[in-house]
Amino acid sequence: MAERSLIFPADEFRGRVARLQHQMTADGLDALFLTSAADIFYVTGFLTRFWESPARPWFLIVPATGDPVAVIPSIGAELMGRTWVPTIRTWDAPHPSDDGVSLLVDTLCDLLPDTARIGVPMGLETHLRMPIGDYDRVAKSIAPRRFEDATDAVQRVREIKTDAEVEAIRTACTIAGRAFDRVPEFAAKGRPLDQIFRDFQSVLLQEGADWVSYVAGGTGPDGYTDVISPASDTPLEVGDILMLDTGAVRNGYFCDFDRNYAVGPSSDTARRVHDALWQATEDVLNALRPGMLASDVHRLLSEGLVKRGAQPGGGRLGHGLGITLTEWPSFTPLDGTPLREGMVLTLEPGAMTDQGRMLVHEENIVMRANGAELLSPRAPLELPELI
Amino acid sequence: MAERSLIFPADEFRGRVARLQHQMTADGLDALFLTSAADIFYVTGFLTRFWESPARPWFLIVPATGDPVAVIPSIGAELMGRTWVPTIRTWDAPHPSDDGVSLLVDTLCDLLPDTARIGVPMGLETHLRMPIGDYDRVAKSIAPRRFEDATDAVQRVREIKTDAEVEAIRTACTIAGRAFDRVPEFAAKGRPLDQIFRDFQSVLLQEGADWVSYVAGGTGPDGYTDVISPASDTPLEVGDILMLDTGAVRNGYFCDFDRNYAVGPSSDTARRVHDALWQATEDVLNALRPGMLASDVHRLLSEGLVKRGAQPGGGRLGHGLGITLTEWPSFTPLDGTPLREGMVLTLEPGAMTDQGRMLVHEENIVMRANGAELLSPRAPLELPELI
């Protein structure tokens, strides 16, 4: 067999399903109906880059008791057959007039009573990965069974990572850490940013990433104006700050952290802001405890920056992490999600420099009973300089 | 500026909008409401890997007359501001109780009359990239304006590539072609498949890919059982066929083709099936004309395989290509989409060998008035052998 086997033992997935079922029972749901790559991977271990093709929908039903049932395109039968999921129904997709709809309706009606309340993630940070026209058709056909919002049921379970998940994320972080250490090999004055992005992705792969789902960054004198743009071919210049940020993937789990480098010598401004970001992060690494709220982290990071003379950047200052590049909660003033043991989180303070530029700093942690444990190798206190 | 500017001149995008508006008028639609990375990139040129984060929805309204209006998270204001889109409204996302909903409702109501019919892609190969709970809230709030299916309006326009798009896809194909030529540098007897996948991605980046959104493949004696699995660490053995398939991206446009290699010496079976796939593809390259249907291509490829003693694989035998790894139509017996000049398509015949194994062959073409023009460098007729 040249294909990879299941990443975790079947018991890992059985445990996840047991926790989802416990939550479903608490919420009065008879099943979950899942369509996203992340939710389906979480339950089944079905890992493929084939999600990149929007052509076909994939369905998973997790009843409140019993094993999950996959209703999927036949092209996935072989790979799903190597997961622990015992029941797999397939159709030949894409089908122009019935792309799994009748098979899905039949399966839901076979499995679930007329009175069933079927949970679908409908809230913040969710998408339904199937045509909404077909979703509406299914909803009508399964009545009086009905779809209800199950965002909480899924998120309260998925946000607590198992030991196996924490180790998978730690592995991704370690790979990225080694790649960040090698940035001086390919980033220097005169080197164009787009080539640096390509080299950084190559090095991530060399260091063990299975694939690199996300690389972003920015550069400019003493900071950057934007952190989501593709790279241009502008060469690095003396006085520039280079930031690289990555979501590298290993065994289906992401890291998400960045590093800053000065094309030396660095200015006092850049060093001062970098120091404030590092120290504010250090404060929070020491202060974090289960029971705090997501909004508390935003406040602590902001206060840590302000007391060191730095101006906090807008937007969220960190978030959850795991099967996707970003997960809930968000470190904003408005997010009241309680932080719990087992959550994997990013601390991502940003600070404004002059002329509307910014620096962003990021680390990945897991919340333990007694506080934060770093998963990313800690950034250096001193802003590193490229030659 | 370290950030990349708009990939095409503004007139490219104005032309696309004019064609969408022409189609909207024909379909009696007053606007399009777009949420997917592909649709928004198509209209605006807004290109970022930040879509990898599911945290925030992004909205674009294309009225039947006038310029598009972007309603987006403030983190995207800088990058969207560098596109040609004149009107950008932002909110601070993610917001736990109103994640752009009220801003979107206000914008739709400002722009469009009470009677407006607003097109949303709801059909095959579409997804709504926003929480469906919020979509339902928007739909209720904008009444009597209403959402209607606009899959055809978008697909009939997007499927005809402009010259600039064809050249972008050709560039991605050329990059991948150079990477396939280098496969013998890193793939050989004894080398594990997962390392081959990593090296292949590195080489794609070295040859000019901005990023590698898709790599798949398979290996096994005289063929493979599956084409969507991640790679295992199993080493290549003599007699194995190695297939690598990639969707490498340059300037936001994909290639999607594969190549097969024998870990030599290859068997008669493998050579015979590879020859049948190559010849069946050649038949279709010569026969394709605008006005044929997608189902005709399936039939021609199947007939070409059968007459050479090969058994066609199940599933579709090719598809559209462009801004995403796969686009409509599908070369299946059921897809009646007419092929038109300017479509970019993949020819992807698969054939079964013994023991349930298969070989898959793939090329990328653009449909011209007088027939198919290859965009991928043609695969060698002789199955290449790795040492």
Image (tube, coloured by chain):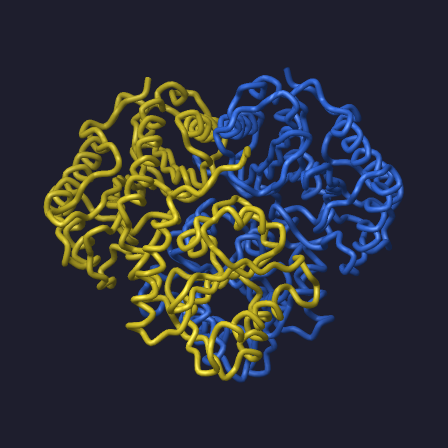
Chain colours: A yellow, B blue
Q: Nearer the viewer, residue A83 or A236?
A: A83
Counting from the top left corner in percent of width and height, residue B191 is at 53, 21
User: Is A267 rendered above or below residue A305?
Assistant: above
Q: Nearer the viewer, residue A263 or A329?
A: A329
Counting from the top left corner in percent of width and height, residue A147 is at 45, 75
User: Is A190 rendered above or below residue A172?
Assistant: above
Counting from the top left corner in percent of width and height, residue B298 is at 80, 50
Q: Quadrant of residue B224?
A: top right
Counting from the top left corner in percent of width and height, residue A242 is at 35, 31
Q: Quadrant of the C terminus of chain A?
A: top left
| Residue at image point 46% right, 51% down | B81
Q: Quadrant of residue A135?
A: bottom right
In the image, is A285 to the left or to the right of B345?
left
Q: Looking at the image, can residue B202 be seen?
A: no
Q: Looking at the image, can residue B153 be seen?
A: yes
| Residue at image point 83% right, 41% down | B305
| Residue at image point 57% right, 58% down | A72
